[in-house]
Image: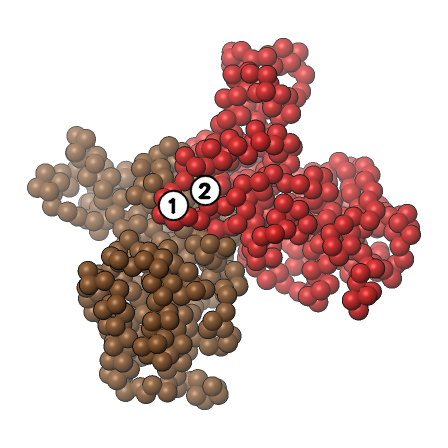
Chain colours: A red, B brown
Amino acid sequence: LTEAEMTDSYAVGVDLGGTTVRVALVDRAGQIRHEAAYSSNVERGPEPVIEDMARWVGEVTAAANVTREQLIGIGIGSPGPLSPSRGVVHKAANLPDWIDIPLSRSMQERTGLPTIMDNDANLAAYGEFWAGAGKDVDNMVMLTLGTGIGAGVVIKGELLHGHFENAGELGHWIVVPNGRRCSCGQRGCLEAYASAGNVARRVVEAIRDGETSILSGLVQKGTPFGSRLVVQAVHDGDPLAARIWDEACYYLAIACVNIQHAYNPTRIVMAGGMSKAGDLLTQLVQKHFELLAWNLYDDFPEIRIAVLGDDAGVIGAAGWAWKAEEEGRWNAEPTC
Amino acid sequence: LTEAEMTDSYAVGVDLGGTTVRVALVDRAGQIRHEAAYSSNVERGPEPVIEDMARWVGEVTAAANVTREQLIGIGIGSPGPLSPSRGVVHKAANLPDWIDIPLSRSMQERTGLPTIMDNDANLAAYGEFWAGAGKDVDNMVMLTLGTGIGAGVVIKGELLHGHFENAGELGHWIVVPNGRRCSCGQRGCLEAYASAGNVARRVVEAIRDGETSILSGLVQKGTPFGSRLVVQAVHDGDPLAARIWDEACYYLAIACVNIQHAYNPTRIVMAGGMSKAGDLLTQLVQKHFELLAWNLYDDFPEIRIAVLGDDAGVIGAAGWAWKAEEEGRWNAEPTC
């Protein structure tokens, strides 16, 4: 494409989730031209879900008054484990019956557009790197604090994959030897202490063990709640919520120290449900980080909150497609 | 250089240590043609040490009957923190008065040869990757278990540096929250539990705290000992030595799990004094690793012992120089 054609072109970013699929047309500057979100209905199995995705690429394109010729290709963020280089989803906890599904090829055949895919947490991180909280830095790690903890590692503009293409699973770093059981089979994972889901779960467990809290009533009634209500309870001065929130920030600070020594990034970005706490998250993580930090070298990353919200996934997926287009490597091996 | 000239050429590998400096001529296949080791005498400050290094490049070349024209350049492994891209040693615990020393430029001016430098642990890892325990894989992490724990991370043939050029300081990963004090100022570092120096120190501390061991006599006499005698005591059935050795292997296994999730390498290589224990190290680390490991994906690295011994540093330094020559980037920024 010529430079003029590029400026009037779009990549399609798709964020495939267990509940919602998002599809967006994104220009070369990282701006969304048009976006749609619809229910995944994953219980139907892979084929109808992929068929829907292909159809929605058409819908969004039509709704935006964009022609097929203006599309450079598709990027898809999917739950994993998966193989970006082969375009295959090996399996995915929230997508029933997705076993070794050739997602890239299926989308390419249905749409006629070159397609690239990657782990959803990786592409959300790439989105913030390309057009959000990391757009002015060269190396960035993002932690997405949701039901679990997803992560993505960007090194000099490249997503890190590693030999088995599953690098950057930092939610499963062991931070407490012989600690809490994690759904992955390990003990003491970062995720078991510091994901939004587990922060709420730990409050419930503590109340069931007899501790008192302004959230006790909800627990007695069996009303489910997430990290948002825990954050509210911290703001309302609840000691139990404050203690468990502080512990989560302490373990996140240990993760930040370990990220510093692992990758030496310029910036660490916090995203996902828990990041909506804003300063209550970053200031506590920063405080613990400074108490934990070494004194050998001044190589400390900045700790920031993500800025793209739920759009990070589609923007990153589209940005990764733009990168494939510009570097002519739609079908190439990842470089790191 | 033509292919014919390359096959009769050598890179100079230099391994600058606080006690010993090693200098070797290494061919393009990673074979040492000639090698020398001499006392660093670092108490003289940086200038005489650099002068000696330049002189020994000449000595080794002459002793090997190699001409100046057959040398493609010099690679130097140095203690850090340092900047490979600028060729500057910021400071180094074992090198008195080395503050922001432009080591690459100094050597280049003295020898007339292009010079590249990097962290000593990085280049030892690159040596094993290029010509040793990792020569058949694409991604490798090496832990050097000595006085402290050094590490190097190779991703698709590139050493990982990160923004501050100090990535891969895995000896300072926090593995025990609020754990043992480390010399770096942190608490609970891997190094504080699992370096050769700290394994011996922990045995001494336990004996002073009243535990009995076949090493008690040495401790009472104040005779210093290292991990070699601890390993001997394990082989001789000493329960205290066995417990502390097992704990070290347990923390190394946690580090291996965290390396798996950080970088997804094909192989993890153990080097340094403790690696001389061989199977007693790898089999225990492997046993703990399998007990700790997750069940989500079969992305487990192999755990191996290094094979190049004390030559890893000079071979890696020379290999890094060969890479600079072949990629025409003696003065380029590191790519990852």
Can residue A29 be seen here? The reply is yes
Residue B45: x and y, percent?
A: 23, 62
Task: Identify whether B114 is placed above or below B150.
Answer: below
CA neighbours of label 1 inside 10 A, class few (<14), some (14 to 19), many (20+):
many
Secondary structure beneath disc 1?
helix
CA neighbours of label 2 inside 10 A, class few (<14), some (14 to 19), many (20+):
many
Left or right for A317, reference A245: right
Closer to us: A219 or A230: A230
Which residue is pictured at 42% across the width and 73% down the height?
B321
Task: Identify whether B288 is placed above or below A192.
Answer: below
Can residue B126 be seen here? The reply is no
Residue B208: x and y, percent?
A: 16, 34
Residue A93: x and y, percent?
A: 66, 39
Which residue is pictured at 60% across the width and 57% down the height?
A158
Say which quarter of the image contains residue A274.
top right
Residue corresponding to mark 2:
A257
Q: Which mark is residue B86?
A: none
Secondary structure beneath disc 2?
helix
Q: Are marks 2 and 1 in contact (CB under 8 Å)?
A: yes
Which residue is pictured at 71% across the width and 64% down the height?
A326
Q: Which mark is residue B172?
A: 1
Closer to us: B172 or A29: A29
* Chain of the residue under the numbered disc 1 shown in the image: B
Residue B126: x and y, percent?
A: 41, 64
Callouts 2 and 1 on one subunit: no
Task: Identify whether B52 is placed above or below A38.
Answer: below
Identify residue type, mark 1.
His
Identify residue type, mark 2.
Val
Task: Give the distance between the C-alpha atoms of the residues marked 2 and 1, in whole angstroms.
Answer: 9 Å
